Image (spheres, grey):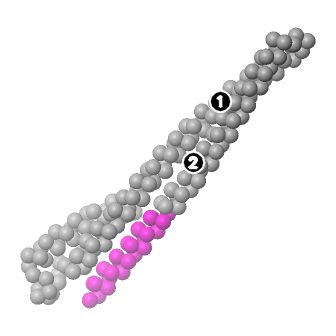
């Protein structure tokens, strides 16, 4: 009976640990999704800024053709706008790379989360079978020899399947 209590306490501790890990991964995934959303918004802002700068550049080029009086200042402005445009395009590319990287991280976290959800239910079932078939159980009336051997095999499988989720 004492061993059963110890096993139950161990199982409850493991379950609590797994639940906290699951909630931590869920929070991380949600945080990354928020970050991806923010980066996508920043990317859209940078694209808008880039298009505005391009329009200004086009306007300056049109003015260059029609008005020769301020030609030198327009050339300077044009050069400045071209530099700003280049910087904005570089920033857009950098943000696109960051967004893709964050999307990959979100995908990985979603996969881990779904794996945890899938693997959690069979683990509990195997643990219950593990409790029913202790290796030094005294009552052979409760579990026959063949079912006991089958349950011992399942117990070994349960232990080996949970090794990858331990710290």
- Was residue 5 drawn as part of the magenta stretch in this picture? yes
* Magenta-colored span: 1-24
For label 2, the SS is: helix
For the stretch drawn in magenta, the main secondary structure is: helix
Q: Nearer the viewer, residue 91 or 20?
A: 91
User: Which quarter of the image is occupied by the C terminus?
Assistant: bottom left
Q: Which residue is mark 2?
A: 36
Picture coordinates of residue 97, whole percent (x, y): 55, 37
For label 1, the SS is: helix
Name the residue located 12 percent from the left edge and 76 percent from the top edge: 147
Whichever of callouts 2 and 1 sits on the residue coming sooner in the sequence is 2
**Crowdedness of circle 1 by 10 Å Cα count: few (<14), some, many (20+)?**
some
Q: Which residue is mark 1?
A: 89
Picture coordinates of residue 7, whole percent (x, y): 30, 80
Q: Is residue 23 something one can see in this rendering? A: yes
On screen, residue 69 above or below 6: above
**Looking at the rendering, which quadrant does residue 50 occupy?**
top right
**Looking at the rendering, which quadrant does residue 90 occupy?**
top right
Picture coordinates of residue 10, whole percent (x, y): 35, 77
Report whether 167 appears left or right of 92: left
On screen, residue 69 above or below 44: above
């Amino acid at each position: 009976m004492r061993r059963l209590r110890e096993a139950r306490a161990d199982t409850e501790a493991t379950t609590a640990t797994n639940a906290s890990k699951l909630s931590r991964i869920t929070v991380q995934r949600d945080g990354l999704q928020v970050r991806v959303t923010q980066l996508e918004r920043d990317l859209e802002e940078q694209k808008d800024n880039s298009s505005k700068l391009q329009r200004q550049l086009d306007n300056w080029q049109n003015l260059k053709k029609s008005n020769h009086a301020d030609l030198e200042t327009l050339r300077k402005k044009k050069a400045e706008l071209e530099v700003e445009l280049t910087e904005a395009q570089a920033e857009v590319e950098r943000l696109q790379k960051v967004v893709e990287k964050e999307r990959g991280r979100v995908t990985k976290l979603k996969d881990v989360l779904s794996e945890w959800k899938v693997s959690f239910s069979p683990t509990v079932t195997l643990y219950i079978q593990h409790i029913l078939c202790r290796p030094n159980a005294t009552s052979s009336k409760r579990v026959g020899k063949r079912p006991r051997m089958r349950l011992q095999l399942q117990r070994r499988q349960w232990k080996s399947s949970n090794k990858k989720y331990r710290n």
